[in-house]
Amino acid sequence: MKTVQLGSSELQVSALGLGAMFFGTRTPTDMSYELLDEYVAAGGNFIDSANIYAHWVEGFKGGESEVLLGEWLRQRGNRSQQIIATKVGFGYPGVLQELTPRTIEEECNKSLKRLGIETIDLYYAHVDDYNVPMEEVLEAFDKLVNAGKVRFIGASNYLAWRLEEARGLSEAKGLSNFVCVQQRHSYLRLKPGGSTAPQVTTNTDLFDYSRRRNFPIVAYSVLLGGAYTQPDRSIGREYLGPDSDARLAMLKTIASETGATINQIVLAWMLHSDYPTIPLIAASSHQQLQENLGALDVKLSADQMQRLDNAR
Ligand SMILES: NC(=O)c1ccc[n+]([C@@H]2O[C@H](COP(=O)([O-])OP(=O)(O)OC[C@H]3O[C@@H](n4cnc5c(N)ncnc54)[C@H](OP(=O)(O)O)[C@@H]3O)[C@@H](O)[C@H]2O)c1
């Protein structure tokens, strides 16, 4: 799998990241290991987790994804080849939703322990916190970088103007800066006035920011939880706007022109976009993972990209 430099960081991440949200909870250990091995065999090296994954699954309390990854890294002995990303900021049992310096430090220590590693390669602020001054948040992350606990920092669910605010502050104060943003992003767009709060969905503002600053978007929930193709699921109402029928029809058209699947077209459209985008794929079966990895082989022409971009 091709690798790309993650913005201004020194990280060379694979073109598709792997979401580990349900590993160790909804996805049993054996299957999680198999999917991780399969992703690595395909050349993947960018694995995404969070302190809270996946506390909302019945019978679990959070931290299970990190624990599973830690054990898998130990058993495979491949820590140095993998880029491990995790996050702090959302609440889970016993921990508030906040980015206070204390929570950032405490949660980082817990994540390091669960992952069984000395340094987190990419540590995200999982959600913006308007109650803590941005400077204090950046100072807290910078402290972790200086202590060698974290290599690079990222933001998730931040608006473009807040990313620019952070960049200005980091530059002025000599602090570590966010190297990417992880945002909700699919081919279907939010309808006017639609919201996925507290998750933040990409918009033209962020695309422009990303393009002009060469600031990567790590895209999550790209396949809308399987709703593009799984007959038992429906696409969220917030995505059903004036252009959704035209966009769903265009996905079908381009899929039949290329011989690729609809999910592969969604992913290939992201890989071909003119702002740096690294989609996170997620899967609960071999077949899903293979289909999603197959998006790497789909070539879209300039004309096909234009028709996909302009479908409305
Ligand atoms: N920063 C954030 O706030 C945030 C939020 C959410 C997620 N994330 C990250 O992003 C990753 C992916 O998120 P997501 O799970 O929401 O992604 P998604 O792409 O919207 O959904 C993945 C789910 O779709 C189904 N699926 C996957 N491939 C498929 C295929 N080829 N055909 C049919 N169905 C398919 C599977 O559901 P079934 O298993 O039910 O079949 C799979 O679990 C997470 O693991 C996490 O690392 C970050």
Image: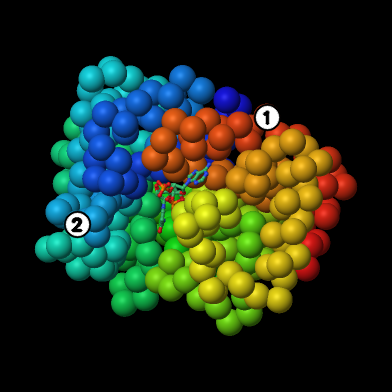
Viewer-nearest of labels 1 and 2? 2
- Residue in the picture at 16% in, 39% down: 113
Residue 93 position (above or below residue 301): below
Residue 179 position (above or below residue 161): above
Tag 2: amino acid: Glu
- Residue 62 location in percent, x, y? 20, 52
- Nearest the viewer among 155 and 74 is 74
Residue 160 makes an appearance in the image? no
Q: Is residue 81 left or right of residue 113?
A: right
- Residue 6 location in percent, x, y? 54, 40
Residue 90 makes an appearance in the image? yes
- Residue in the picture at 56% in, 35% down: 291
Residue 30 position (above or below residue 276): above
> How many C-alpha atoms fall within 10 Å of the one at disc 2: few (<14), some, or many (≥20)?
few
Question: Could you give the CA–CA distance between mark 1 and mark 2, rounded to whole angstroms?
Answer: 37 Å
The residue lying furthest to the front in this view is 231
The image quarter containing residue 309 is bottom right
Tag 1: amino acid: Asp
- The residue at which mark 2 appears reads as 58
Residue 274 position (above or below residue 81): below
- The residue at which mark 1 appears reads as 297
> How many C-alpha atoms fall within 10 Å of the one at disc 1: few (<14), some, or many (≥20)?
few
The residue lying furthest to the left in this view is 94
